[in-house]
Amino acid sequence: ALLLKNVKVPQFRDTIGWINYRQGDFNGATALLERAVTELPRVAVIHYHLGMTYLATGQGAKATDEFNKVRELAPFDDELKGKVDAALKDRPEKSKKGANG
C-alpha cells in the first residue's frame, strides 16, 4: 500500500488514508482523506472514512457533517448508513456535545 502513497489518484489516497486510520495514524489519515474528499466530493464512502477519522480525533461536529453528507449522497445504501448509525451511537460523549470540533 505504501507504493500508492505518492500516486495522484484520489481513490488511492482514500485507501491509504483508511489504512492509516485502521493502524491508528489518525493525523496521517485525516490529511489524506481531507484531500481525497475534496477531489471526489460525491463519493459517500470517502466521507464516511473522513467522518470516522474526525471521530477518532475528537472532532465530533466535523464527523457529524461528514456523516450527514454520506446520508445525502447514498440515501439507499443501507449498509453504509448502518455503519454511520453505529459510529454515531458508539462515539464518545464529548464528541456528542461537539467538543473539539
Image (cartoon, rainbow, N blue to C red):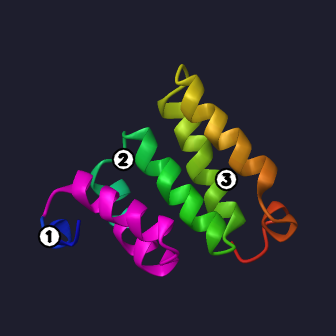
Q: Position of residue 77 (x, y in %)?
A: 52, 24
- How packed mark 2 is, by other alpha carbons closer than 10 Å (few <14, some 14-19, many 20 or more), is some
CA gap, disc 1 and disc 2: 24 Å
Disc assigned to residue 41: 2
Q: Identify the mark nearer the N-term, 3 or 2.
A: 2
Query: Which amino acid, mark 2?
Result: Pro
Q: Secondary structure at mark 3?
A: helix
Q: Identify the mark nearer the N-term, 3 or 1.
A: 1
Which residue is depicted at the point 58% across and 58% down?
Answer: 52
Q: Position of residue 53 (x, y in %)?
A: 55, 65
Q: Determine which residue is flagged by label 3.
A: 64
Q: Position of residue 59 (x, y in %)?
A: 66, 70
Query: Which amino acid, mark 3?
Result: Thr
Quadrant in the picture for the C terminus: bottom right
Query: Which amino acid, mark 1?
Result: Leu
| Magenta region | 8-32
CA gap, disc 3 and disc 2: 16 Å
**Above or below 18: residue 24:** below
Q: Identify the mark nearer the N-term, 1 or 2.
A: 1
CA gap, disc 3 and disc 1: 32 Å
Q: Is residue 100 left or right of residue 7?
A: right
Q: Is residue 55 left or right of residue 69?
A: right
Q: Are marks 1 and 2 in contact (CB under 8 Å)?
A: no
